Amino acid sequence: MPGGEQVTLISEEPEILSVASLSEIIRERFDTPTLHGISVRGEVTNYRLHSSGHMYFSLSGKSGDGGVAIDCVIWRRSALRISPPPENGMDVIVHGYVDFYPPYGKTQFIADSLIYAGAGGKYLLLEQWKRELSAEGCFEAKNKKPIPTFPLRIGVVTSPTGAVLQDIRNVLSRRFPLDLILSPTQVQGGNAHHDIACAIRRIDGHVDVIIVARGGGSFEDLFAFNHPDVIRAIASCRTPVVSAIGHEVDVTLADLASDIRAPTPSAAAELVVCDRVTLLREHADQKAAMQNLLLDRLERLSTELEEIRLRILSRRIERRVSDMKQASAELHERLQRAIAGRLTTERSKLARYAAEIRSADLRAPLRKGYALLFADGEMIRSVDALLKDDSVTIYLQDGEMDATITEVRYDRDI
């Protein structure tokens, strides 16, 4: 080289790192705020629950993301707080940090929480609520209250600006006008469930039946009526509750907790009140039927009464005849006794009279051999009544004779 200078070329070889050193460097690079405390949304794939209780899965991006995926792990302590557990295909949001695992040279996302995103997440949350509320007895059939047949006041829990309220009013005015009390509430939105529950509690006990109603909508629109606050408010109601949420195909947990479910708000109004036209027609029919029944019964009773009267009359006649026969027999017996007694008496009298007659018969002594002496038609009882040469007539049993007294003698010993 010019000037006699020599140039020495120094060759510097690159540093050769060990695998452990490289892994440490990578891990240090991941230790940055931008990769800590972040939330990532994706689809669960390759889910596996380890026997230790740790959850392992991959979080895949959407189809437009080029099919990228990142391995995720949720340690047991955090996994215990996740219910229900995730399944493949679910749309989830995980929160945590990115870490590098040196033993396998593996980059993974360490999640400390997992929530379900979109409709899929809400469906899972709905199932969780359903299990919890069912365990509390909110859907028990034995707790269902009957709807009163003739309520005086109807309470409606719905939006004051929607068509639902007007539909219910129209049905009530047509079928059976009565008092309608509105407990206004939001029926959609993030805090709607709290508003609905408050509206139900506010009107409970002030009406005879409550209609909880909302017009049709998507699953997301009706989701507030699945919230436990609303379900517990319905289940604890003293007043019977009719749910009318969405269309007939839409079924919310509020429908399961209510005492009766109507397919639409208009149908709910028809359920809680009777149709006055139908009632009047039924009343007229029942009145006519009762009149006919009463007339038939009166006619039947009149016939039965006449039969009874005839039977009673016949019995009275029989009894009267029997009584008369009995009286006649008694009179006959008394008469027989009286006649017999009278005959006995008369026979005694006759015997006495006969004896007297016999004793008074002047001819009776003649039949005994005695004689009667008469002078001048007078019976001579004493010799003192006779004188010598008196003419007398002597009566004997078989005849008489005349005689002249020749001598009168006195027997002083007689």
Image (cartoon, rainbow, N blue to C red):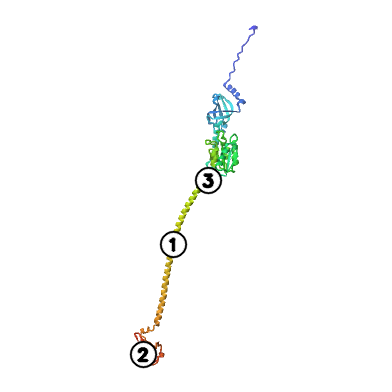
Find disc 1 in the rendering and name its residue: 317
Q: Amino acid at mark 3?
A: Leu
Marks 3/1: CA–CA distance: 54 Å
Q: Earlier in the sequence, mark 3 or mark 1?
A: 3
The C terminus is located in which quarter? bottom left
Q: Earlier in the sequence, mark 2 or mark 1?
A: 1
Residue 168, image x, y percentages:
56, 39
- Quadrant position of residue 255: top right
The N terminus is located in which quarter? top right
Residue 258 seen from this side: no
Identify the residue at image location x=42%, y=67%.
328
Find disc 3 in the rendering and name its residue: 280
Label 1 SS: helix
Identify the residue at image location x=45%, y=57%.
306
Q: How many marks?
A: 3
Q: Nearer the viewer, mark 3 or mark 1?
A: 3
- Quadrant position of residue 345: bottom left
Query: Mark 3 touching mark 1, by CB under 8 A?
Result: no
Label 3 SS: helix
- Quadrant position of residue 394: bottom left
Identify the residue at image location x=38%, y=89%.
392
Find disc 2 in the rendering and name its residue: 403
Q: Which mark is residue 174?
A: none
Residue 69, image x, y percentages:
55, 25
Residue 384, image x, y percentages:
41, 90
